[in-house]
Each structure stands twice: as structure tokens, then as C-alpha cells.
Image: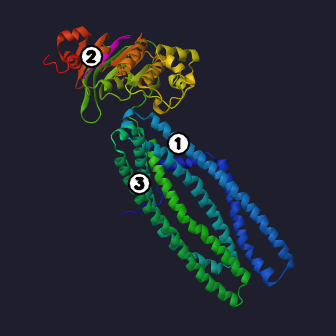
Amino acid sequence: MTKKPLFNFKHRHKTIIGLIRKNQVRLISAVLCMIAGAGTTAALAYLVKPVIDRIFVEKDARMLAFIPVVVIIVALIKSFTTYGQTYYMDYVGQGIIRELRNMLYNRIQDMPISFFHREKTGALISRVVNDVMIIKNMVSSSVTSSLKDVFTVIGLTGVIFYQDWKMALVAFFVIPLAFYPIIKIGRRVRKVSTRRQESMGNMSSFLHETFAGNKIVKAFGMEDFEKGRFFNKTLELFKIEMKEVRAHALSSPIMEFLGYIAISIIIYYGGSRVINGDSTPGTFFSFIAGVTMLYSPLKHFSKINNAIQQGLAAVDRVFDIIEKDTDIREAENPVSLITGPHRVEFKEVFFKYEEEFVLKNINLAVNPGEVLALVGMSGGGKTTLVNLIPRFYDVSSGVIEIDGLDIRNVSISSLRRQIAIVTQEPILFNDTVRNNIAYGNAAATDMEIENAAKSAYAYDFIKNFPHGFETNIGELGARLSGGEKQRICVARALLKDAPILILDEATSALDSEAEQLVQKALENLMQGRTTFVIAHRLSTIINADRIVMMVNGRIVETGMHQELMTLKGEYFKLHHLQYNPGGGDV
């Protein structure tokens, strides 16, 4: 069985090193501060010899006046260098955390809709917040400490070898023995740290879910059940953290025990040399001070190694997302769509999420300015079909064309600029009314925003808010009614002024009064646009230019309302179910 290397450097680790190198000037400044700081530590150890030999043994008054001043100067230099190394390395660490968060967030935003269906929201948030912070600690704290300790060890090693090279060899005898258990413990820390970060992600996901669904939790009286579930998650995290604590706790005692063994041998050997007259008390105590200072950074290496292993585990979790391939790829030489009326055509389109096809042999052409309604029972493939147009998913086979161009050859940004969407669930952001309407069109003027609100029948209720268009609407528009939220979504779509419009059951969640207002707003929105309407209530699409009936992923009927009613097929059955429930056979 081959042994695993302590550090298996991959492309992701080189990326981290590359980010560190981007801050070379500050990094060099920090290293210079560390070297100076290590020199002051070595100097303090060396000063023990003249203090004992010249002051306490020889009773030299001049040295008594001189050495305290030197100690103060050395301590002052040490203080400045400690501040410098801390500031510069934290600057580097904070810069890296910013870069990584940007890289991670950019990658998440570029992932297709299917990615968000697979991943837990809370787990993604945990990677952006918690895992990146662990990497920052590894870079700014652990790397700082390790570099500082290396320079300190070099300086103190020079002092103790200068004082007595024979005793120095004895002191260094136990060091190789100490590093083997540290390496073994470090590997275990990395493994356990990965589990802890995964558990933190699960907890974040759980919290996001229960906080967002708190109304349902209370409505069904499930508070105690959710408390129990949270208790189990905290217990699981506690057990993992205790495994990590045990691994951490072992490192320091091992180094400390081995250090005391070395010091006890030095005391016996060095004391014998002083008694025999081969060395002075000052040399001996200076040596002991140097060794004591030396073992402190050596012992610290075990903690640093544990922190580095935690950081590398976090690097793996972060880069698992950054390096993840997306299913939706930009063409090598994409074409840009020109804004204007568009013809959309599906040619022999098949699509599946996993194994089973949810769309089968879709052939459909929609002309510029035409209103096409998609109807059918839930699960028939209506939403999936319209989600293929902006390339939220790509077809499994077949082709979708806009003005004769395969949309896979069109740049994704220019494709999506041509499309506006209003969904059943109004998605709004915790911002002002103005910014929510202008979302996607930051250059819009106040007049354009207000006109969009008027066309969406939203202007009147917005002006009644305490701060009008500057009113903050809360998370997901929590301070608005369902109809108000939907009308702001319509205003947002109006302001985008895209030539292709997708309305995915935009009124199905509203009461009759709100539906009438939103329907009026939608009629304004649909004018002159190639429109795909997914409708739950058939009354809202009677006047559509064409109605497509879908069953189990297939188009089974196409025509205007009266034509489909005359056929007495699937559309007729669906209409009968809505308007004559329990009314007997058709």
C-alpha cells in the first residue's frame, strides 16, 4: 500500500498560492517583519548570558546600566515587527477571502438551474461564508505563524549552537521523533474537518428551510418536531467537533512531553559542565532560555499543521464548486441576437432530467407577436418547455431556433436579453420598489420606472407607501400582498421591454380581484410580443392566438379555443373539469 504524501498539491492549491503571490509587496514586508522579529527573539535569549555573567557574577555596574536599555530597544523593535507582520498578513488573508468569495459566487451564478435543484441553498451559503473563512485563517494566521516560527527557530538555533554546540545536538535529538505523530494527527484533522464543514452546511440548509417555511411550521403545529430535528443536527455536529478536539488536543502534549525530555537531559548535561568548570552559568542559562524559546514554536507547528489541514479541507470544498463543469456552455463563436420581433421554433425536441423523457417530439413554431397558450394537467411538461427557450436547460435532442438560429449558437447573454419572465411565485429582492422594478435595467429613468408601474397597475398602491418608490419591500417582498408583488414583477418585465415573453401561471396563486388587476397588467405587457402563456385557469387564455394542449410531454392538440372545444378532445375534457366539476360524463 503506497503512503499518501502529507501535502498533495493540486491545481486548486496552486491557485491559492497564485492569489497569495498577487500580494507580493505586502507579503515581502510581512516576511521582513518576521525576520526582524525572529532576530529580536534570538537577541533576548542571547542577552541572558551577559545578564548573569556580567551583572550577577562579575557585578559590572556599566553593564547593569546598559543592558536594560538594550532590552527596551529590542522589545520596541519586536512590538513594531509583530504589528507589521500581523497587519500585512491579515491584509493578504482578507484579500484572498474576497477573491475566493468572488470566484465562488461567480461560479454559482453561472451554473444552470439544474445545479440549484441538486444543491442545498444553505450548504452553498456555508461554502461562501464558513469554508472561505477557514481558508482565510489558514493563510493569514497559520501561514503567518509558520513563517514567523521558522525564522524564530533559525535565529534561536544559531544562538544555542553558538553557546554550546554539543548541548545543541542533544536538544535537537528528539525533534524528528515528535514530527511523526504530528503528521498522523494532521491527516486525521483534515478528514474530520471535512465532515464538520459538511455538517455545518447541512445545518445552514436546515435553518434556511425552516426559517423560510416558518408560517407552515406554525400552521401545522410542528415547532416541537423541528426543534427535535435541530437537536439531532447539533448533536451530530457536536460529536464530529469532539473528534476534532481530541485530535487537536493530542498534538500539543506530545510535543510538550518530548520537549521536557530534551530539557531534562540538557539540565543534567549542561549542569555537569558548569560544575566541572567547562561552562559558565550565563552560558548555561542563556542556552536554556534559547531552548525553551525554541521549543515553543516547534510545539506550535503541531497546531499550525492542524489549521493547515482544516484549510486544505475547506479549499477542496470551495474548489469542488469553482471547478464544477456547467451543462450550459457558451458556443466558441456565439452570435448575438438583435433586439426586435422574433420567431421561435421547436424542431423534434426531446428532453429528460434523468432517465425518463419529460418532453417528446415537440414540433412547434410561434410567430412574432403571437400569443401562444400552453395548457394541460400538472406534470405535462409545460414549464419544462418554456424553460428551454432561455437555456435554463438544453435539449436532449432536436433543436430550438430563434429566427432560424440554433439558440445553442447564440450568446447566452444576448439570448436572455430578448426574454422577460413572470412566474407563478413572484421573486423580489430585499430592496426598494424602484430597484426591484429596475432590476435588469439599471439605466432606466425615473419616468420610465413610473410608466412601467402605471402600465402594470402598480403605481397607485406604490404611491401610498410611506416612502413611495423608495420603500423597502422586505425579504422576497414580504411586506406586499400577492397581487402587489405580482404587479411589481409585471412592471419589471415591462421595463425590460424584451420581445419574447414567458408567463408561467402568473395569476394562478391570486384571488379573483387581484387576478383581474394582474390580468390587465399582463395584457399591456403582451402587446406586440411573442408570448408563451402557461395557464391554470382556462378563462385567462380564451383569447390567445393559439392554444397548445400538452399531455405527458407531448403536444396532442393545437388550435383556438372554439376549435378545440369543437374537437371534444383533451382540451374539452380539461375545460369540462374546470367548469363542470362533478357534472357527469362529457
Q: What is the number of the mark on residue 101?
A: 1
Q: Nearer the viewer, mark 1 or mark 2?
A: 2
Q: Given the image, on which type of amino acid does mark 3 rest?
A: Thr
- Quarter the N terminus occupies: bottom left
Extent of the magenta region: 366-376
Q: Is residue 139 above or below residue 484?
A: below
Q: Disc 1 or 2, which lies upstream in sequence?
A: 1
Q: Residue at x 53, y 76 (%)?
A: 257
Residue picked out by circle 3? 234
Q: Residue at x 52, y 46 (%)?
A: 15
Q: What is the number of the mark on residue 259?
A: none
Q: Is residue 368 above or below residue 326?
A: above
Task: Spot the residue most to the left.
Answer: 585
Q: Is residue 476 above or below residue 299?
A: above
Badge 1 marks a residue whose secondary structure is helix
- How far from the left and from the top, in percent, is residue 224? 36, 48
Q: Quadrant of residue 237?
A: bottom left
The reply to whether residue 240 is in sight is yes
Q: Given the image, on which type of amino acid does mark 1 rest?
A: Arg
The reply to whether residue 334 is in sight is no
